[in-house]
Amino acid sequence: MDYQLSRGDKVFNWFNMVLVGILTLIILYPLLFVVFASLSDPRQIFDHVLLLWPRGFTLDGYKRVFGNSDIWMGFKNAIIYTGLGTAVNVIMTTLAAYPLSRRDFRGRNVITMLFTFTMFFSGGLIPTYLVNQALGIVNTMWVMIIPGAISVYNMIIMRTYFQQNIPLELEESAFIDGATDMQLLLKIVLPLSTPIIAVMMMFYGVGRWNGYFDAMIYLSDRNLFPLQLILREILVQNQMGDSVNQAIMTANQSEVNSLKQSIKYAVVVVSSVPVLIFYPVVSKYFEKGIMVGAIKG
Amino acid sequence: MESSVRKKLLPSAKGKSFLKQRWLYIMMLLPLTSLIIWNYIPMYGIIISFKDYSPAFGILHSPWVGFDHFERFFNAFYFKDVIINTLRISLYSLAVGVPLPIILALMFNEIRNKKYKSIVQTISYIPNFISVIIIVGMVMFFTSPVDGVINAVIQYFGGEPIDFIGNPRLFPHVFVWSGIWQSVGWGTLIYTAAMSGIPQDQYEAAYIEGASRLKCIWYITIPAIMPTIVICTILATGSVMSVGFEKVLLMQNDANLATSEVLSTYMYKAGILNAEYSFSAAVGFFNNLINFIVLYLVNKFAQKFSETSLW
Amino acid sequence: MFRSRKGKVVLLGTLMMALLVTGCGGNSGGSTENNKSSESGKTSSSISFLRPSWNNLRPASKDLWMWQEYEKMSGVQVEWEELSDIGEKKNVILTRKQLPDAFYQVDWSNGELLKYGQQGLFLPLEDLIKEHAPNLQKLLDENEDIRKGLTSADGHIYATPYLDPYPEGNRTIRLYINKKWLDNLGMEVPKTTAELEEALNAFVTQDPNGNGVNDEQGWYMPSGSLGWTFEQMMMGSFGIGNGGRKALGNFIYVDDNDEIQLTIASDGYKEVLKYENRMYESGAINKQAFSGVDYDKWTADAAKDTVGAWNWAAPDYIGESVKNDFVPINVLAGPDGDTASLTDSQVAGASSLVITKDAKDPGAILKWVDYFYSEEGSVFGYLGKEGVTYNMEDSNMVYIDEILNYKDGIGLGAFQYVDNVYGGYFPYIELSPEIRAAAGRQEAPVYTDLTEETLPGVTLPDLPATQEEANESSSIVADLGNYVGQMRVEFVTGTKDIDQEWDNYIAQLKKMGSDKYLQIKQEQYKRYKES
């Protein structure tokens, strides 16, 4: 924007920038804490109220994380599940969100209700497991990709975006040109909706990347484990539960404990760095959306 | 604005026959199939709340017990406390968790320096990726009355150190604000996307008319993202009985138990630890029923008073 | 609503498609399952076990030296299925059409064993043990406690145990006190609760670590530990500790008339709380005993020589760098001279091996596992084989150098070869602490204060409960646990006065059903004694 700013606006600008800067610093410090802690001797992390640089610098945590032979396989699997899964998610969500965004779509309210209902009521783990078992996808990569294709929450967000941002005039004129609804979606609606598609990719992508529960329940073949499940194994030791006592005494516990301590923060860094690359890539589409939006006006 | 235009056009749309809309139905086919297979076929599992489920008999053949599990839950000694604690935390979360991402998104949106904007946005959403265990560990360290950074600041300004995590009155604050810290940046994404759909010419026109930045926000940006705000708010109210289980459990201790025992943790202790799956399912069912009713009512309200609603 | 018929057609079409997809998938699902079961059933002498996964710490079971060796020795091939987070998956696993032959090292509560046993998922084993497991049978015959501890309320045995005959091992939680500090202050190792109080008070006031800073803590552990470590040990000193760790964990003890009583409603408990309250106020118990300190923080503090005393079964829990500063105390005499150590039943795990209804040859499984209830089997499980994983040194069995020099410690080094060194709950009988220590060229600690005299008079297992009792008591226990936990904080930190509030506290316990609970436990104990 190159037009001249008024004085009030300038003040506003500075005030806003500074405030956002302060908030960002507050958010940033704990993040730095994790990074520094991952490079520190676990016994020195708490030495001072502020951890402003690695104390007792060590790469042990990272060496151990990457020394784990399953890590790379986990990365590979996670990338596959996240990539394919997110593609399925975004396609399916778009397919549901677009018709439901059309106020002239018959059965719109009923179908929305059907979807919304499932946000609250489900048959639980066992019947779902049985369905997946019947489909023959338990302990295959497909169980990580196909089920859970639509998050109703995301679908409703996307629907709202369509309703809000696709001018009806465009649709009407497309119909007059003889376009079908499918052509309309592909040629007009989607190009105008890159921002929401980007958001959906992020929501689903991060959800897929971070998810471990389905993998934990449905996968038993280690070669199929996604990264998060392997990291979880490292981080959350299988503690033998004892219904009476809160912990059991077992031999060699301290060796395992110290192993865990040294690796804890490195695990977080390793698992979240790939997701961080996501945003800069995806954020471009926010800008594109603006441009397209400007053209259409 | 646009939706009102749309409404005017609706009558012409009404006449459309099914055949004309066939593509819309074809689009819905896959999503509906998925919904039926993974949501509605397993739905029969709801009945385990009314049964004494045992894996030996399976869901269908386990004996019925009617409302026994519900009665046990309603008669539980801590029933009232648990409900109150749950509502306290979740309403508090809603009260700050819904508006803050909107405000932050507006602030982000007003930043003109693209690089700065990209950096602060990226930083703001990273906490979302940190696992709960680590978050809770950090919260405990930062709030420690002995060597935590927050108390160091308080003491620097002459205050007395505060035991945040061991005080039942402070627990909701610690829980909610650490949650905000973790999710507020991520929460702005939806609004950022919604804002990026606003045509720039509106701002330009406003500027030519001499409107200030605040006025532009108030009269252009906010109305434009209002439907998104309404929808997100409605959806958020639908989780009024749900409080993140893992984090509460990790932050819980005997000292703050008076306010930190919520539905999910209670259910875990009373049911899952003893493999009483039906009891847990019944508590979960009750929980979601309330959620659903709240969402339904809020949506009704939205239908009446705003242009946007879920259905 | 779908007003047009076409709408219905669409819905119908979708439904049919759904069924179609389900149908196709169903077929392929069936075939893969068949493949699997035929694969696992290829030899007649193969059995399938499901167990927790330790794959992040050591090779998978099928690749572990010990199991490959035992396959040769026994001629039985085991198909191991290893899963992490079994606790969360139990429910789903049990719905499988084909269960594994047995669950190995999986934790089932008494209630679950009885329920699934009675419903036919788990097999009763007592007759099969008689026939196929002579070593285990011998243990059952010779040791009443083991038999009683394993027998369910319906008289059946549904699992083989993890046994630890040695109270001087991990079964006992002891107090570790900083000997270096005691020496610096010229104090003796405390023998009574009063002396402990004196010592800890001296710790926090007289700068025993000599750094000139008042950074010493008295009793200090991760928050939340106090209630089930220190406090339960003190119950022994205040006359309400008879019954062992599992009993105290269930809020019960055995009184002088051999009757079950509630610890949390007893006068002795009132005294324990007062004792703790005094120490808390003076700083002898760490101010953050109830909130704010996790294990990482604690070990970091300990490494800076700031911990005076703490509880655990072995000293290494506090970290390698300072563990040698501490000496163990098993019992402290209370004001009335009472002593009872905080020792667990020798049936340390009561569900180590559970055989399911789908086992093809349950007898073979028992025969397979029985080896580990012999001395030879114990040595094999912990040390492996002479010349392979251990060598003889002065009549001691000592691990090979690869194990002794393993980068993460001897225990994890051994875990790369043998199974029964980490995790507990294996179907197995533990070796003596001397042998285990010698395996790592160490010496087992000698406890002069852990004798027949100071052990609890009886050490109860989890008392067998009927289905009905389990249902009734589970929510009472959960409520009592919550309430007692909260009140402990208030009493110990002094926000509520113990004398003033005690009657209210007792009344509240009764409101929650403590009487009912006590009655159930008394009933169970009676049955237990008669069994």
Image (cartoon, rainbow, N blue to C red):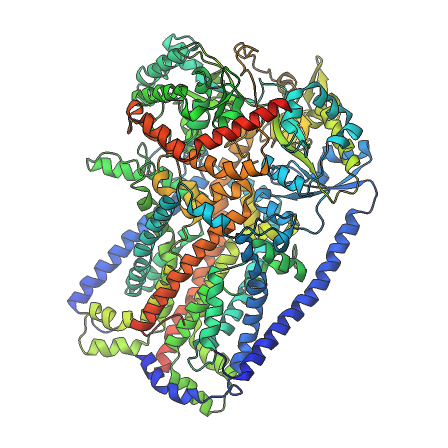
Name the residue: 33% across, 61% down: B117
Image coordinates for residue C88, horizontal then vertical, percent: 56, 45
Q: Specify whether B218 is left or right of B259.
A: left
Asked whether C219 or C319 is in front, the reply is C219
Q: Specify whether C487 is left or right of C73.
A: left
Name the residue: 47% across, 58% down: A277
Tell which residue pokes out farthest to the left in this image.
Answer: A7
Q: Quadrant of the N terminus of chain A?
A: bottom left
Asked whether A18 or C26 is in front, the reply is C26
Image coordinates for residue C449, horizontal then vertical, percent: 52, 11
Q: Quadrant of residue C113?
A: top right
Q: Quadrant of residue C350?
A: top right
Q: Specify whether C98 is left or right of C73.
A: left
Q: Quadrant of the C terminus of chain A?
A: bottom left
Image coordinates for residue C283, horizontal then vertical, percent: 32, 22
Asked whether C59 or C33 is in front, the reply is C33
Name the residue: 34% across, 86% down: B8
Asked whether A11 or C64 is in front, the reply is C64
